[in-house]
Amino acid sequence: MSGQITILGAGVAGLCMATELVARGYDVRLIDPKGGPGAHGCSWWAGGMLAPDCEGAVAEEPVVRHGRKAAEWWTANGAEITYGGSLVVALGRDRQELDRFARRTDRFDWITRDRLAEFEPDLADRFDRALFMTGESHLNPRPVLLTLRERLKSNGVQVETTGTPTGQVIDCRGLSAADRLSDLRGVKGEMVILRAPDITLSRPVRLLHPRFPLYIVPRGDGVFMLGATQIESGQRTRATVRSVMELLNAAYALHPAFGEAEIMEIGVDARPAFPDNLPRIGRYADGTLYANGLFRHGYLLAPALARMMGDHLDADGNPREKPEFWHENHN
Amino acid sequence: MPTFYGTEIASALMLGTAQYPSPAILADAFRQSNAGIATVSVRREAGGEQAGQDFWRLVSDLNVALLPNTAGCHSVREAVTTAHMARELFNTPWIKLEVIGHADTLQPDPFGLVEAARILTEDGFQVFPYCTEDLVLCDRLVQAGCEVLMPWGAPIGTGLGLNNIYGLRSLRAHFADIPLVVDAGLGLPSQAAHAMELGYDAVLLNTAVAQAGDPATMARAFASAIEAGRAAFTADPMSPRDMAAPSTPVLGKAFL
């Protein structure tokens, strides 16, 4: 295919979109006033879990279905993916949370202490059973975003900081697009990055708790990401003591050695979400296309949105069936 | 139907707005529940720049009366500040007053509650206190100006149901003219029906619906149960008795 495309926004949505459309032969420009991925965008602060089955305990079916294909897309596009599954645990008092979680998800094995000791020896004396989510994987968001940017660059697509869009415009600006999408809202998330050399984990671990659910993603070299709060607020800059305390408490409950960890970063941003917490691709009244509303599923669903947009463009904007998540705006 | 501070509400169900999988599912649950009041929590951090207003707009679109709460406040001062913020944000004198006294059980602090209720009532608020089923505490809350009482069924989010039926029944008997709402601890529709059978005016719940696998269906189940419980109370139920009384007369047999 050919045709000029201008993508606005170089977060995970815009970079995946650009990567997919370049691969399909489009002439792509990428504009982001901040010059590319970085601390100004919420995908910089993500956990990077590709955990469709865990998310399925709360999220709707399309998140699981599309999410299961994400790791394959990322691998094909140069991202380093760790295929180790993930674990779900609960403290003794909250055992029934684990049963409930298991009832609402799929593709897991119940494992007991012996098997847990093979997977994650550091957790085996703390938990006597866990769910092992067999099909899940994870990535490290920042290097992955930078990899996409570099690969685009080597394909002749530089992130422009200024410039007038040309050709078909695709708006991937995340929460900044709330100026055009009236029902897009921010859902605040806070996270912490720790260095805890005394703890070894090889895969993401979710700690179920009735008040403070937490996940921990190992980033290598004794570095861990703790995430994440989920607050109905578009506030993007202030992490509160209460939130950070909850995250740290939960980490300490998972393993007391986190008490000795070094706090490297406290991060905060707001995720862009529509009222059903599902993403959309669509068209504004002026013909500009958009992909947005990835909520807490940026790395999980951005590839699917990019593929859907590619299919839509390949059919000259007139596919026989409208893409899933399609939305026509009247402004 | 219950009347709170002179406002009649068309439903005996008050539903919380937290912990749903998405705002769309929240809205669906409200439609199925026919709830008349939505409680909404005010995070203090969100107040300054009204950063939560997108969500609050979604809640306002539910077209039910809004009852802001002071969830998560552990002191009188915190609760009073949050109540003021809520009054500004939602333009209502109603406030569901929570003053938490114990971090683990989220049990109300009765002493702080009475003090905060007095301060807020004097300041023109119409207070809905989240309290225990203690008769003396409830008396003090009424003296402090509360015209509604909201005793717990069980600790928040536990789903344990009505832990002290005797206590709830004696509150009903003692406060015949004050609207009573069972607030917190309900997990199943049958428990809500039981509260209504005791003569309670309404029930307030959140987790039981929001954390159900299918919130909208659970909301509908609660709506039916509440209607059944209310109807049972107004129908003047029979009293339990020890001796069996056959519903079909046993003609031709000697009385024993």
Image: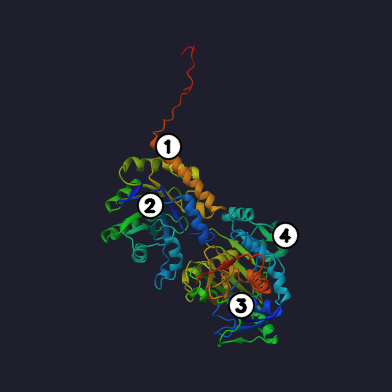
- Left or right, A49 with respect to A243, comes to right
How far apart marks 2 and 1 lie (CA) works out to 26 Å
Q: Residue B225's spot in the image, x, y percent? A: 47, 43
- Closer to the camera in the image, A4 or A174: A4
Q: Is residue A193 above or below residue B35?
A: below
Q: Is residue B87 above or below residue A81?
A: above
Residue type at mark 2 is Cys
Q: Which amino acid does label 4 sit on?
A: Arg
Q: Is residue B175 visible?
A: yes
* Badge 4 and badge 2 both on one subunit: no
* Circle on res. B186: none
Q: Kindly check if marks 4 and 1 are in contact, taking CB atoms under 8 A apart as contact.
A: no
Q: Which of marks 2 and 1 is in front?
A: 1
Q: Residues under labels 3 and 4: Cα distance? A: 41 Å
Report which residue position mark 2 lands on. B131
Residue A87 shows in the view: no
> Callout 4: residue from which chain?
A
Q: Which chain carries label 2?
A: B
Q: Do tag 2 and tag 3 residues touch (Cβ < 8 Å)? A: no
Residue at mark 3: A14
Residue at which label 4 appears: A115
The local crowd at label 4, few if under 14, some if 14 to 19, many if 20 or more residues have their Cα within 10 Å, is some
